[in-house]
Image: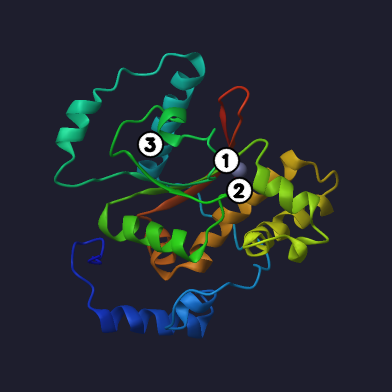
Amino acid sequence: MEIKSRKGDVIPGPTRRTVLRGAVGTGLVLGAAGMGGGFAPRAAHAGSGSAPPPLGPSQKAVLDSLLEGNARYVSGKRKAHDLEAARKGLTQGQKPKTAVIRCADSRVAPELVFDQSLGELFVCGVAGNIPTAEIMASIEYAVLNLETELILVMGHSSCGAVDAALQHRDGIDALPGNLPGLLSEILPSVLKAQKGGGGTLARCIKQNARDAAGRLSAMSVVVNDAVKAGTVGIASGVYHLDTGRFELSGG
Ligand SMILES: [Zn+2]
């Protein structure tokens, strides 16, 4: 996969490595991905990072168009997308304005929820919609190559992954397979939600989505640079399975 800067220049390998080495030195990249090796399980994140800055006008327009699409979806008045024409028009490339980090849950379909067509959303999914190293690499590709302006973390009600972290908060390590690694990424948000009182699943889900958004810049030099330059914005929210409404986190 060729890596380009947002200006379209190909970034040579040594420069990228230099960037990563620098990032490790300043603690900007977490885990093995920034240490010059392959991927390895990371220690659970310590917190939510910092809240993303407010969206710029262009990023806000992108988000507004998604929310308008969601309103159409909720009201049952989705556009009649010409998928055949869209498919043919996209054979030479893609320019999705939004990258979505979604849960793997089969009930959460961003293109339907936001009433978007082919080529409009760059969708990355993992149970619990957490920013893993692989998800971040995918997001970085979109930011550098596809003119993506908005990164949207999409939590959802009744999330089984967040619920599992909540239910097994004192025994995650005893769970089978790779689940402990995944759920330990969600656990800090669950604990934080519980500190605030209540600790219901809905609160944990909200906190998890907000924390994921807050961690993106800290996990990626590419994202951090783009956000600082004002070319990319970050938002998060929760999709409600019952009503179909996507509720923004609001800061
Ligand atoms: Zn889920």
- In terms of secondary structure, where does tag 1 sit? strand
Task: Give the residue displayed 60% in from the left and 28% down from the top.
Answer: 241
Disc 1 to disc 3, C-alpha distance: 17 Å
Q: Which residue is mark 2?
A: 209
Q: Position of residue 231 (x, y in %)?
A: 35, 55
Instruction: Check the image and report above or below for 53 versus 63.
Output: below
- Say which amino acid is labelled 2: Ala
Dot 1, crowdedness within 10 Å: few (<14), some or many (≥20)?
many
Task: Give the residue displayed 45% in from the left and 63% down from the top.
Answer: 134
Q: Earlier in the sequence, mark 2 or mark 3?
A: 3
Kindly indicate the quadrant of the structure image that contains residue 191: bottom right
Q: Which image quarter holds the N terminus?
A: bottom left
Q: Which mark is residue 61?
A: 3
Contact, CB < 8 Å: mark 2 with mark 3?
no
Kindly indicate the quadrant of the structure image that contains residue 8: bottom left
Q: Earlier in the sequence, mark 1 or mark 3?
A: 3
- In terms of secondary structure, where does tag 2 sit? helix
Dot 2, crowdedness within 10 Å: few (<14), some or many (≥20)?
many
**Which of 19/44 is in front?**
44
Instruction: Check the image and report above or below for 100 versus 228.
Output: above
Q: Which residue is mark 1?
A: 237
Contact, CB < 8 Å: mark 2 with mark 1?
yes
- In terms of secondary structure, where does tag 3 sit? helix
Instruction: Check the image and report above or below for 191 versus 69.
Output: below
